[in-house]
Image (spheres, rainbow, N blue to C red):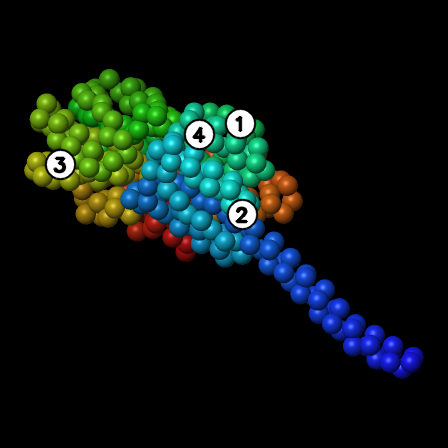
Amino acid sequence: MLNIQKFLIALLIPLFAIACGNGERERQVSEDEERLIVIITPSHDNPFFLAEAQAADEEAQEMGYRTLVLSHNDDPARQDQHIDRAIASNASAIILDNAGADVSIAAVERAKDAGIPSFLIDREINATGIAVSQIVSNNYQCAALAAEEFVRKMGESGTYAELVGRESDTNAHIRSRGFNDILEQYPELVQVARQSANWSQTQGYSRVETILQAHPDIEGIISGNDTMAVGAAAALRASGKTDVVLVGFDGSPDALDAIREGRMHATVLQPAAKMARMAVHQADEYIRTGETGYPEKQYFDCDLVTADNVDQYHMFERIED
C-alpha cells in the first residue's frame, strides 16, 4: 500500500509543478498583454506628427510594449474618443500630442483618474500636475532663432508677411511672439500682412496667393511651421517670385529639400523623434517605478538649419557623426 502511495505522489508532483508553471506563464502572458502604450497625435499628413508617432511606436515596441497609434486630426472630440479607448483598453500609458492647450485638460485628467499616466509631446496643456511629463520644444527660443536669421537674410529692412498656425494652438501664439519680439526691434522691417494658415500646406499656398495680390513687391515671409512655408514656397514659385526670403519652423524633410534647392532660406529644427523616444522611456520608467526622474515640464532648444548645414539633418534629427 505504501508503495502505491509513493507511486501516486511521484506521479502527481510533476503534474502539480506543470500546472503551477502553466499558471505562472499564463499570468505573465496576461501581464504582458496589459503592457499597451497608446500613441495619439495630430494628422500624419504632417511629416512632423508622422515622425513623432513613428519614433514613439518603434521605441515602445523595441522595449516590449504593444502599441496603438491613433490620430485626432486636431479634433478635440476625436481626441476624447481616443482617450476613452485607451482607458477601456487598460493602457499602461498614453503618449499624446494634444488637440488644444485648454480643451485637452479634461481628457488628460480623465485618463489620470483611470490610473493611466499621460506623457505629452510637442504641445503643452495649460495645466500642471495632470500629465506626468510635458516634453516640448522651447518654442520661444526656436522662434527667436528663426527671426534672427530672417532679419539677417532681409538685411534688416523690407516688407514681410507672417504665416501663423492654428489659433487654438498655444505653440502658434508662442512662436508668433518669439518672431515679433525680434522683428519689432528693426524699424525698417515692416509687416504688411499676418494670416493664419492653420499649419496647412494648402492654406499656406492660398494665403500667400492672396498676400501677393495685395502686396506684389513683398520681400519676405516668416512662417510658424514648415508645412505652411512649403505651401508658401510653391505659391512664390507659381508667381515667379524667386527672390523672396522665406524662413520656416520645424525642420521637416520637405523644408530641408526646399533649402537645398534654394526655395527656402532657413528653418529651425525641432527634435521631434528625440522628444517622442524620451516620452516612451519616461513612460516605461514611470510604469516600473512610479516616477520618471525628470520635472514635468521639459524644454528642448532648436537648431538653425541653413544651406550651410542642411546635410547634417534628416527626419527631424541631427545626423550622428
Disc 4 marks a residue whose amino acid type is: Ser
Q: In which quadrant is the N terminus drawn? A: bottom right
Question: Could you tell which of marks 4 and 2 lies nearer the N-terminus?
Answer: 4
Q: Is residue 276 above or below residue 13?
A: above
Q: Residue 200: x, y in percent? A: 25, 36
Which residue position holds label 3? 236
Foreground label between 4 and 1: 4
Which residue position holds label 2? 281
Callout 4 touching callout 1 (CB < 8 Å):
no
Foreground label between 3 and 2: 2
Callout 4 touching callout 2 (CB < 8 Å):
no
Distance between the Cα atoms at labels 3 and 2?
42 Å
Q: Residue 178: x, y in percent? A: 35, 25
Q: In which quadrant is the C terminus drawn? A: bottom left
Distance between the Cα atoms at labels 4 and 2?
23 Å
Disc 2 marks a residue whose amino acid type is: His
Is residue 294 visible in this depiction of the protein?
no
Which mark identifies residue 128?
Answer: 1
What residue is drawn where x is 75% and y is 68%? Answer: 16
